[in-house]
Amino acid sequence: MIKISNLNKVYDNGYEALKSINLDIKDGALVTLLGPSGCGKSTILNIIAGILDPSAGDISFDGDSIIGKHPKDRDIGMVFQNYALYPHMSVLENIIFPLTVGEKKIKKDEAIKIAQKYMDLTYIGDIKDKKPSQISGGQQQRVAIARALIQNPKTLLLDEPLSNLDARLRLSIREEIRNIVKEVGVTTIFVTHDQEEALSISDYIALMDEGVIQQYDIPQNLYLEPANLFVAKFIGNPIINIYELENANPMLRTKDFSIGLDELLSTRFKDDLKDKSYLLGIRPEHFILDDNGRIKVEVSSIEMIGRYMILHFDLNNQASRMVVDSKLAIKPGDLINIDLNYEAIYLFDQDGKRVY
Ligand code: ADP
């Protein structure tokens, strides 16, 4: 198990990039560090790899601290955004390179035998004699992964490995990456800023903001049970709708609609509602089209996605979105009645803490 305890990083210019990070990563798990650019994902990865030293805290592998250990002695494989393949070497030479240098180097023909397994796993056997410049971005990515795995590392670190690929290729390669690391059984830490990528690939996600882990959970829980407003806004596409509500017990009231507190499920309350105002979060898929719906809105535009479409409308003077079946005959300018799925809404206090 990888255990990160109270990890802190202050850069030389005084910027505190990590604030007491705690994370347990089980053997064989695929864990994603997710968050907006600058939240500290690469800083964590670089400290694990030994490229950076932490300012405080510890990281241990199976109970042994790795802080201070040379990067070479950490049993780690890494793949970065720019795959850094050696341009003058063939695919095969690139892959066996780590096995043919250093103290533990082995004979070239033995290395080639081992490479075959990883080339099969990553589907690059037929391009083994090509140079990196002669293969596609997706193939380069597979070569980089094969080269990282051939050393049989205990931990694989992947830093935004898909960011140089086009959208469709990203979809297929992320699936492949999951299959490959699961087949090999290597503990994998994957960094991305793309929530959809994280949701689709991970066993667990650590969603970060400003050097703090906001939620560490299985993908489903990040979407269904966000710990706070930041998580609710970061996860889900299209983005969640947020409205300010006045607490006028027994109602929560806003300009265009109100919610009776007795309509909410008592079991979902995490706290009593004592504040004057709260923020309501409702995902676009949790508005309901209903002729008797209590909220009347005018559809301003429609975005066709394929499986569903997004209706845009104004609610509470706020640009709002709801997701509906793409077969529905709704046009811009139509007045529609909608309601909320009360079981799927969230309430946050003004600090962003979830209370319902
Ligand atoms: P992410 O990978 O999530 O985009 P990083 O870990 O690269 O974020 O960076 C976290 C924060 O630390 C950012 O605000 C970044 O500007 C800052 N940072 C990164 N490297 C340095 C450095 N060498 N000196 C000062 N600040 C840095």
Image (spheres, rainbow, N blue to C red):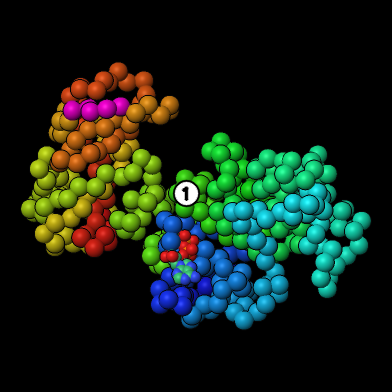
The answer to which quarter of the image holds residue 79 is: bottom right
Residue 300 shown in magenta: yes
Residue 90 is situated, as x and y percent measured from the top left of the image, at: 80, 49
Q: Quadrant of the N terminus?
A: bottom right
**In the rendered structure, which amino acid carries the disc numbered 1?**
Asp
Q: Is 241 left, or right, of 175 in this rendering?
A: left
Question: What residue span does the magenta drawing correspond to?
Answer: 298-302
What residue do we see at 53% from left, 57% from top? Answer: 191
Residue 192 is situated, as x and y percent measured from the top left of the image, at: 51, 54
Q: Which residue is mark 1?
A: 194
What residue do we see at 71% from left, 64% from top? Answer: 153
Residue 48 is situated, as x and y percent measured from the top left of the image, at: 58, 70
Mark 1 element type: loop
Q: Nearer the viewer, residue 286 or 46?
A: 46
Asked whether residue 54 appears in the rendered view, the answer is yes
The answer to which quarter of the image holds residue 229 is: bottom left
Residue 70 is situated, as x and y percent measured from the top left of the image, at: 67, 77
Q: Is 112 left, or right, of 275 in this rendering?
A: right
Question: Looking at the image, is 20 positioned above or below residue 292?
Answer: below
